[in-house]
Amino acid sequence: MRSGRCKGSERCSFALLEGERMAIRKIRYIGDEILKKKCKPVVKMTQSTRGLIGDLFDTMYEAKGVGLAAPQVGILRRICVIDVMDENPIVLINPEIIETSGEQTDDEGCLSVPGKVAEVTRPAYVKVSSLDQDLNPVIYEGEGLRARCILHEMDHLDGILYGDRANEPYRDLEEEDLEEEEWDEN
Ligand code: ZN
């Protein structure tokens, strides 16, 4: 769980600094054809790609998500950001699964499918190879929610929504769950 871990300073560079202009992008919702498309690899790190990564973090935090993939803001590139609040946030660029093991079943939600949840069974552990923001190779590992989030975001890069893998149809997020969430925020 430590390999390829981002340094603390990287979080600062993405965190919303006071007075800094936030760049929140519009999140695409289920039904938008772009969410079904396969993304292209990143071959060069440009200013606009760096800007996109910053915007993905801003947009994810603003929407109170734990992960966001570029196609969810309409960009068909193999980039996603993850922050499950247990470790430092990570950026995955051109990620590939190296290894998975075990199994976990739990409710999952998606910023592109608002107000819905469904039960999804996924591996309990995942190891991925990726590129960092300077396009150097890195290895990330995850268990539990972190593994679930990595796999969920990587699916977006291939045009797969969690509903395609779910054990049941989407169901409404129950009112008590929403109340609980609101309560947590206070
Ligand atoms: Zn999603």
Image (cartoon, rainbow, N blue to C red):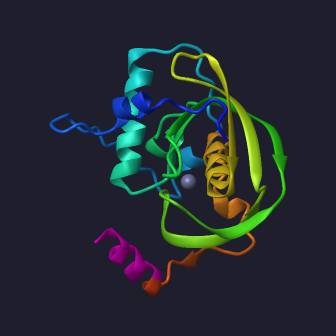
Q: Residue furthest bottom?
A: 176
The residue positioned 64% from the left and 51% from the top of the image is: 152
The answer to whether residue 130 is left or right of residue 14 is right
In which quadrant of this rendering is ligand 1 seen? Answer: bottom right
Residue 26 can be seen, yes or no: no
State the residue in front, 76 or 144.
Answer: 144
Q: Is residue 186 left or right of residue 99?
A: left
Magenta part, dominant SS: helix
Taking the magenta stretch, the answer to whether it contains residue 182 is: yes
Position of residue 45 measured from the top left corner of the image (x, y, whole percent): 50, 15
Residue displayed at 58% across by 17% down: 135
Q: Give the camera-side residue of 19 and 70.
A: 19
Q: Identify the residue at horizontal 31%, vertical 43% (top origin).
A: 24
Q: Quadrant of the C terminus?
A: bottom left
User: Residue 105 lies in what quarter of the image?
Assistant: bottom right
| Magenta stretch: includes residue 175 | no
Residue extent of the magenta highlight: 177-186
